[in-house]
Image (tube, rainbow, N blue to C red):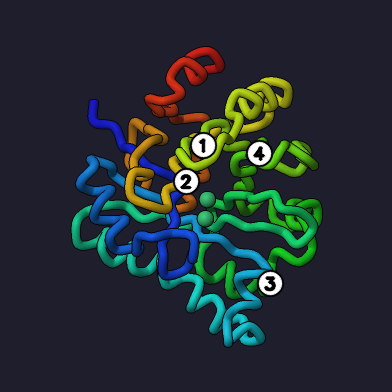
Amino acid sequence: MKTFRIDPHVHASETSACSWISGSDMAAQYKALGYDGIAITDHLHEGYISSLPCRDNWDACVDKYLSGYRAAKAMGEKVGLALIFGVEIRFTESDNDYLLYGMDEQFLRAHPYPYRNGLEDFYNNYHDKLLIIQAHPYRGGGDNIRPRFLHGVEAVNDSPRHDSHNQQAFALAEEHSHLIRTCGSDAHRPGELGRAAMVFDFPVHDSLAYKEALEKGAYHMECPNFRDLIEKYT
Ligand SMILES: [Zn+2]
Ligand SMILES: [Zn+2]
């Protein structure tokens, strides 16, 4: 059966200064790697927005923020790669990062500076609209993980520049059975692309479809470097 493979954690250099690869190159390279889709999950936090000259004009900030995603999407349309809109948000209250899916541009425009009020407030307001997945929860030591305000955790983060302590993330998801588990490459630079995939038996073309497929549990994880861990826990 034809499967649909998505890398749900990718950064584009137009928006994420830590990435060395543009959105359009990311899309072209993922297509060449045999993927069917990627999520561009650029960093969104106070430090980034306050560094922009347009910081006080939220709409202009959103335009700038979307530039990496848009470039990837344009290339995706050309080569035949689905582009999923995601966000990696960091609230001002801590250094934890959270991947958001199920949103669109309108949501972002309608909710200015969404990182300012913290995870609990964000979850309480939007948990029925968005999927909130804590990214690499143990990379920074695992402080202040609050499963009650999460839909899931990134159980496998295969960035080669970090030890994300994936085993601990799986153990957390075991302990809190409501937590959805995901895997992702967290791709920023050459050599970091295509290390993990979320695999579906059906096409997943946008952020809402990705969210709904995860909620149904209709996927499996593929990550050669962590195959043993995935087999042990799933
Ligand atoms: Zn980054
Ligand atoms: Zn990331």
Distance of label 3 from label 2 (alpha carbons): 23 Å
Name the image quarter holding residue 114.
bottom right
- Label 2 near label 1: C-beta < 8 Å? yes
Give SS at disc 2: loop
- Left-right relation of 83 to 54: left
Q: Position of residue 8 (x, y in %)?
A: 45, 45
Is the residue at mark 2 in contact range of ligand 2, meaning its CB lies under 8 Å from it? yes
The amino acid sitting under disc 2 is: Asp
- Judged by depth in the image, the label closer to the viewer, 1 or 3, is 1
Q: Nearer the viewer, residue 203 or 76?
A: 76
Which of the pair 162/186 is nearer the observer?
162
Residue 228, horizontal then vertical, whole percent: 47, 15
The residue singled out by tag 4 in the image is 137
Q: What's the residue at 75%, 44% (across, down)?
A: 149
Above or below residue 173? Residue 30 is below
Crowd class of label 3 (few under 14; some 14 to 19; many from 20; radius 10 Å): some
* Residue under numbered circle 1: 157
| Image depth: mark 3 or mark 4 in front | 4
Mark pair 4, 2: CA separation: 13 Å
Q: Viewed as shown, does residue 92 lie left or right of 72?
A: right
Answer with mark 3 or mark 4, whichever residue precedes in sequence.
3
Does 171 sit left or right of 228 as displayed?
A: right
Q: Closer to the N terminus: mark 1 or mark 3?
A: 3
What label sits on residue 186 in the rendered view?
A: 2
Mark number, residue 113: 3
The answer for how far apart the CA atoms under marks 1 and 3 are is: 27 Å
The answer to whether marks 3 and 4 mark residues whose Cβ atoms lie closer than 8 Å is no
Q: Which residue type carries mark 4?
A: Pro
